[in-house]
Image (cartoon, helix red, strand yellow):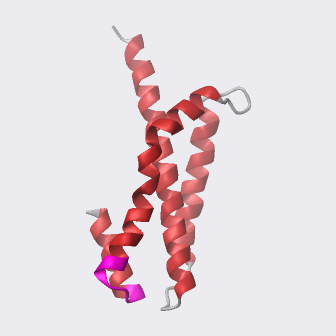
Amino acid sequence: MVLMVIVNMFQDEFFINAAQAQMEVAWIGFPFVFAFVYGLFSESIPIYGSRRKSYLLIMSLLEVLACLVVVLVPINSMNYSIQITSAALSACSFAMCWLDTIVDGLVVIEQRKDP
């Protein structure tokens, strides 16, 4: 449902055709291809002695900043705003996927504690 809104935003606000809008959506969803790597990375490389909490904070901050960029960038028909919006939505997707992977790991650990 959200992807349809993004496609409509690209078509209505940036005046690009459906094929180009779908290509932008494909790039926005690309970070989900490497979701398994995020869990391995966060488990292998701790930041300040924490394996998950620091990544949760960093990725949450990245997601908030990316969403702010989407909201604050003025929409016009120039190409740079399309690129900025796509990059910000891709960063938001990347952070969301990373957060989802970390939270899934936390759920598994908490489930193991409860027999």
Figure quadrant of residue 18 = bottom left
Residue 17 colored magenta? Answer: yes
Magenta stretch prevailing secondary structure: helix
Please report the bounds of the magenta region as a residue range.
Answer: 13-20
Viewport quadrant of the C terminus: top left
Which residue: 63% across, 46% down? 58
Residue closer to the observer: 12 or 23: 23
Instruction: Kindly give the residue lying farthest to the bottom in the view shown.
Output: 77
Which residue: 50% across, 90% down? 76
In the rendered view, tell whether residue 63 sits above or below residue 67: above
Which residue: 45% across, 28% down? 105
Any part of residue 108 in sight: yes
Any part of residue 52 in sight: no
In the rendered view, tell whether residue 59 sits above or below residue 1: above
Which residue: 55% across, 58% down? 64
Horizontal side, residue 64 vs residue 5: left or right: right
Figure quadrant of residue 46 = top right
Position of residue 108 measured from the top left corner of the image (x, y, whole percent): 40, 22
Horizontal side, residue 112 vs residue 86: left or right: left
Residue closer to the observer: 94 or 34: 34
Position of residue 53 measured from the top left corner of the image (x, y, whole percent): 60, 33
In the rendered view, tell whether residue 6 sits above or below residue 43: below
Viewport quadrant of the N terminus: bottom left
